[in-house]
Image: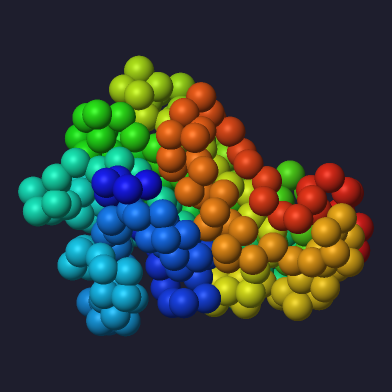
């Protein structure tokens, strides 16, 4: 990744999947730009960006109309063209990540879809201006999109929609030599994951049924993401890559 420059969206702290991806990318020589949802989190993310030798953090709240376009215009004007983008953004009211899926409110359903899925579509739309020499875009999904995982609820629907979006966006952007893929990561203890009911039980069961007898790590996800963002995967687009220690090869049973 020497000489490659890219954007990381969704970094929250050192336990984020986005942090593991950033670490792997930096170890391979990439230059990184980060976004922050609000000014409140900007200082914390700036500290991490400095750790990776990154550029100034750009504000981008994907739930606000026009925010992605403004952020990408700022990046284009101040940084220039990009080679890759990592979209690691998702949302649901944590109070609805427990119990029955049929209790999901309409408001949370729409918000989860807008932030977790539609934001990726919008990112890809504006990425064309930043990737006029081609590039690679990766988003993050989860096996709950394919099989029932207790308490994952509306996020499962949002991730299913995201995965279908990956295929359509790969088709749309292929003529511009922009590849679009997703990583279906096994469960990792992050701030976002802690909002899912009985998450510790999911981790335990996932490790137990894994052929490798362990949970996936940030480094596992980061290294796989480097592959998808680099020329090593030049012939891959529209794919959902499972990085879960083999858990997706065995049916889910709780």
Residue furthest to the left: 77
Residue under the point 35% across and 55% down: 29
The quarter of the displayed image where residue 192 is located: bottom right
Residue 110 against residue 17 in the figure, above or below: above
Q: Position of residue 79 (x, y in %)?
A: 14, 51
In terms of depth relative to the viewer, which is nearer, 10 or 235?
235
Which quadrant of the rendered structure holds the C terminus?
Answer: bottom right
Residue under the point 51% across and 49% down: 225
Q: Is residue 192 left or right of residue 56?
A: right
Q: Is residue 25 left or right of residue 6?
A: right
Q: Position of residue 229 (x, y in %)?
A: 44, 42
Q: Is residue 127 left or right of residue 254?
A: left
In terms of depth relative to the viewer, which is nearer, 52 or 71?
52
In terms of depth relative to the viewer, which is nearer, 64 or 7?
7
Residue 95 against residue 227 in the figure, above or below: below
Residue under the point 72% across and 55% down: 244
Q: Position of residue 202 (x, y in %)?
A: 78, 69
Residue 119 against residue 112 in the figure, above or below: above
Q: Position of residue 20 (x, y in %)?
A: 50, 65
Q: Is residue 246 left or right of residue 26?
A: right
The quarter of the displayed image where residue 45 is located: bottom left
Residue under the point 72% across and 74% down: 199
The quarter of the displayed image where residue 49 is located: bottom left
Q: Report how many numbered discs are placed on residues in the image.
A: 0
């Amino acid at each position: 990744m020497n000489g490659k420059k890219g954007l990381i969206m969704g970094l929250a702290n050192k336990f984020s999947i986005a942090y593991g991806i950033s670490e792997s990318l930096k170890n391979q020589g990439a230059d990184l730009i980060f976004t922050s949802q609000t000014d409140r989190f900007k200082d914390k993310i700036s500290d991490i960006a400095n750790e990776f030798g990154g550029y100034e953090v750009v504000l981008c709240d994907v739930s606000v109309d026009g925010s992605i376009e403004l952020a990408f215009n700022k990046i284009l004007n101040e940084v220039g063209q990009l080679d890759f983008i990592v979209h690691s953004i998702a949302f649901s009211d944590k109070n609805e990540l427990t119990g029955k899926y049929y209790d999901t409110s309409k408001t949370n359903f729409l918000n989860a879809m807008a932030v977790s899925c539609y934001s990726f579509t919008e990112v890809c739309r504006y990425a064309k201006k930043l990737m006029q020499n081609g590039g690679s875009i990766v988003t993050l999904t989860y096996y709950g999109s394919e099989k029932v995982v207790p308490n994952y609820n509306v996020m499962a629907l949002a991730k299913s929609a995201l995965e279908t979006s990956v295929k359509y966006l790969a088709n749309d952007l292929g003529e511009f030599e922009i590849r679009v893929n997703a990583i279906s990561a096994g469960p990792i203890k992050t701030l976002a994951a802690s909002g899912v009911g009985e998450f510790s039980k999911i981790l335990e069961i996932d490790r137990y049924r894994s052929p490798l007898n362990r949970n996936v790590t940030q480094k596992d996800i980061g290294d796989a993401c480097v592959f998808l963002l680099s020329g090593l995967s030049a012939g891959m687009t529209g794919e959902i890559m499972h990085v879960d220690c083999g858990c997706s090869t065995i049916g889910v049973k709780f």
